[in-house]
Image (cartoon, rainbow, N blue to C red):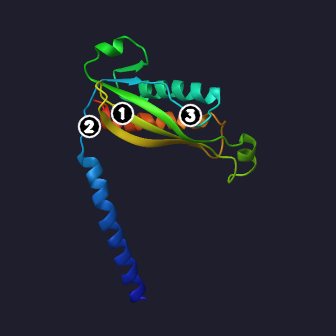
Amino acid sequence: MKRILRAGVGLLLAFVATVAPRGLHAQDKQQPKVAAIEVLPIESDEIKLPAEFRVALYENLIHELQARGGFQHVYREGDRNAQDASDLVILHSWVRGFKQGSERARQVTTVAGATSIKIHCNFTDKNGKSLLDQDIEGKVRFMGGNLRATYDFAKNVAKVARDNFSLQAH
């Protein structure tokens, strides 16, 4: 019994030694804190995304960044006021994966019918310098319509943006 316990503790210590340093490095890099973000339309050239998903992704993203992003200003592409913003981050997004699930299957069983969307997000400064690259997902697994995955994605992006760039980071 002692041998098993010692092996378990050894594995735990090895895991902590390999994972903890990576987590610390990610937190060491400080991103610029800004008051404004400009959101460009989400591109989906390689993956065919239904029109209702494209619209819902963009609208939910704007809404969540306004509500929970911690920015004073959230600009859409083409908003002339964004050009005058001195401290601005620009969000570029590309769809990398999409699986449209079945609302009916989710109602019948909890193991089938999930909808998921994976989008690569690149935050840049006004000069195009990349500040943060990250794949962010949105999912609906149990209850709710397929478009709920777009809300989940937007909520996750707002958290990443707030934590990395917002003056009001929590």
User: As drawn, is 165 to the left or to the right of 103?
Assistant: left
Say which element carries label 3: helix
Estimate the spatial distance between the alpha carbons at disc 3 and disc 1, rounded to whole Å. Answer: 19 Å
| SS of the residue under disc 1 | strand
Query: What residue lies at 39% left-to-right and 38% top-to-bottom?
Result: 160
Quadrant assignment for the N terminus: bottom left
Q: Dot 2 surroundings within 10 Å: few (below 14), some, or many (20 or more)?
A: few
Q: What's the CA distance linking mark 3 and mark 2?
A: 26 Å
Q: Residue at 68% of width from left, 52% of height from top?
A: 110
Q: Earlier in the sequence, mark 3 or mark 2?
A: 2
Which residue corresponds to mark 1? Answer: 123
The image quarter containing residue 158 is: top left
Residue, disc 3? 150
Which amino acid does the dot numbered 2 rest on?
A: Gln
Q: Pick out the residue farthest to the front.
A: 46
Instruction: Estimate the spatial distance between the alpha carbons at disc 1 and disc 2, rounded to whole Å.
Output: 10 Å
User: Which mark sits nearer the N-terminus, 3 or 1?
Assistant: 1
Q: In the image, what residue type sits under mark 1?
A: Phe
